[in-house]
Amino acid sequence: MSNLKRREYADLLKPLQQELEVAARWVEATGARVLVLFEGRDAAGKGGAIHAIAEKLNLRHCRVVALPRPTAEEAGQWYFQRYVAHLPTAGEIVLFDRSWYNRAGVEKVMGFADERQVAQFLDQAPVFEKLLVDDGVLLFKYWLACDQDEQEKRFAERRDDPLKRWKLSPIDLAARDKYEAYTKAREAMLAATHLPHAPWTVVEFDDQKRGRLTVIRDLLDRLPDREVPPEPVELKPLAKKGRKETYRTVKPIAPFKG
């Protein structure tokens, strides 16, 4: 299957984003709590998928969580503790750009967590997620996959593009020769945490545009199909002719000339 062109992608994305807006209106109206985890290889496309979902939604009701490395205080806490504060409240969609599954992935592969800690996590994660689901949280877990050649291509793009260079971290560089180790870690993680109450969905992301559409379509299909009509808005004519902006205390800066 050939990669989608930009125009074709945009035409396919627009109606999906309109459906997302309908779904978000349902979430707000019903007080639902939606939690979506995005995991995957470095440069797989997590950020792009999250942006495609959140781009047209009300930021008061759709929030992105991308936590930095734990502080010294957080490192001394129960592992899941720092994530709990970012869980959705009623009427909210929360999108995690990486999550507690760091422990089963990068922390395991790069040696930041020992075998005991990883084993404990794999035992506790299903229990933690069962508590969330039993309390009514709608939990979705996506793993974004890409071949190593495609990953290397994206690393090179990040290296060569000043606007993307910040995405190429020291961890990314150190992990380049650990592709198979990440595969083994992922399979162990899936074996322990792909369960009926919190299943994983794996999406191929060699074609990032098609991958984003696949994720959004899958998410929409799994959310309750309950449309909430938007409130009618009437814009009555102004009583007087529209006025121009006026400035007394501070004047605008000069416009950009290009």
Image (tube, rainbow, N blue to C red):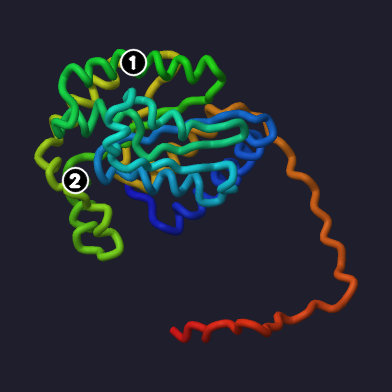
Q: Residue furthest right?
A: 239
Q: Is residue 166 above or below residue 178?
A: below
Q: Residue furthest left?
A: 177
Quarter of the image where the C terminus is located: bottom left
Name the amino acid, label 2: Asp
Circle 2 or circle 1, nearest the eye: 1
Q: Distance from label 2 to label 1 (Cα)?
A: 27 Å
Q: Nearer the viewer, residue 127 or 195?
A: 127
- Rendered location of residue 13, percent (x, y): 50, 49
Q: Secondary structure at mark 1?
A: helix
Residue at the spot of label 1 = 124
Q: Residue at x 69, y 34 (%)?
A: 29
- Rendered location of residue 187, percent (x, y): 23, 22
In the image, taking residue 163 as reference, residue 182 lies left or right, namely left
Q: Is residue 5 above or below residue 151?
A: below
Quarter of the image where the N terminus is located: top left
Counting residues from the start of the chain, the first of labels 2 and 1 encountered is 1
In the image, taking residue 162 as reference, residue 138 lies left or right, namely right
Could you classify mark 2 by the number of other residues whose Cα lies within 10 Å: few (under 14), some (14-19), or many (20 or more)? some
Q: How many marks?
A: 2
- Rendered location of residue 209, percent (x, y): 39, 48
Residue at the spot of label 2 = 172
Which numbered marker is on residue 28?
none
Q: Residue at x 32, y 41 (%)?
A: 205
Q: Nearer the viewer, residue 205 or 84?
A: 84
In the image, taking residue 229 as reference, residue 162 lies left or right, namely left
Q: Residue at x 59, y 48 (%)?
A: 58
